[in-house]
Image (cartoon, rainbow, N blue to C red):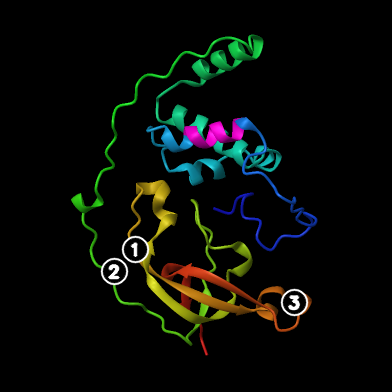
Amino acid sequence: MDGVHDMGGMHGFGPIKIAENEPLFHDDWEGRVLGICRLLRISVPGGMRNAIEQLDPAEYLRTSYYEKWLLARIEGLIAAGAITREEFAAKAAHYSAHPGAEIPPAPAAEPQVEPSRQEHPESPPPPPVFAIGDQVRARQTHPRGHTRLPRYIRGKIGVVVQVYRPQGFQDAEPLDDIGGSQTVYAVKFAGEQVWGESAEPNSCVLLDMWESYLERAST
């Protein structure tokens, strides 16, 4: 998806401010959001990452890290049918008007057992198409859903410097949660190839990329 979240290589955001001794959570509510997302057993249709990327662009830029998590979890609960938008709006209005109101206790959680993927064993992935030293080109593609193929690297030529074991292809998660496995490669792109004349001398970009992101570069 070519969405607002794909900011790699973009300019104009200013320097990154790194706080000294930055706390794990900036406020107590952030820790509660993390706990909700980790412990709530209702799956978000399409996965959390996909839900976050579906946020309104203006809201995505306005909100903080854990605000995005919270909004995505709310939308996930609505999409899963656990609550309705009207029910959520009513509860939000109630606690906004009565911030001291007691929150009802959560029901006792039943033990959950994660389903084993061995129930649907995956076929062995094919052998790697590329080898160390091969020249490859990042595909020029614009998928409708989530992708980890940055816009700024599409169409650029690099060299395979490492071949990893197959990894689950996560771009397919919004479709079926199990996208199969593909060989993953570390690909080195020269700075000039990516940034042109504005690249720093002797700079490079190193990316881990699934096989379907790549095609053999013509010599």
Element on which disc 3 rests: loop
User: What is the number of the mark on residue 181?
Assistant: 1
Residue 97, given in percent of the width and then of the height, sits at 65, 10
The answer to whether residue 141 is magenta is no
Residue 32, given in percent of the width and then of the height, sits at 54, 31
- Identity of the residue drawn at 37% across and 79% down: 129
Residue holding disc 2 = 125
Q: What's the amino acid at mark 3? A: Ala
- Identity of the residue drawn at 56% across and 45% down: 53
- Kindly indicate the quadrant of the structure image that contains residue 204: bottom right
Relative to 41, is 130 above or below? below
> Which label's residue is closer to the chain start, 2 or 3?
2
Relative to 67, is 154 above or below? below
In this view of the protein, which residue sits in the foreground, 113 or 202?
113
For this view, does 132 lie left or right of residue 181?
A: right
Residue 2, given in percent of the width and then of the height, sits at 58, 54
- Identity of the residue drawn at 40% across and 50% down: 173
Q: What's the amino acid at mark 1? A: Ser
User: What is the number of the mark on residue 199?
Assistant: 3
> Which label's residue is closer to the chain start, 1 or 3?
1
The part of the chain drawn in magenta is 29-36
Q: Callout 2: few (<14), some (14-19), or many (20+) C-alpha neighbours within 10 Å?
A: few
Discs 1, 2 touching: Cβ within 8 Å: yes
Relative to 118, is 99 above or below? above
Question: Residue most toward the bottom?
Answer: 219
State the CA–CA distance, disc 1 to disc 2.
6 Å
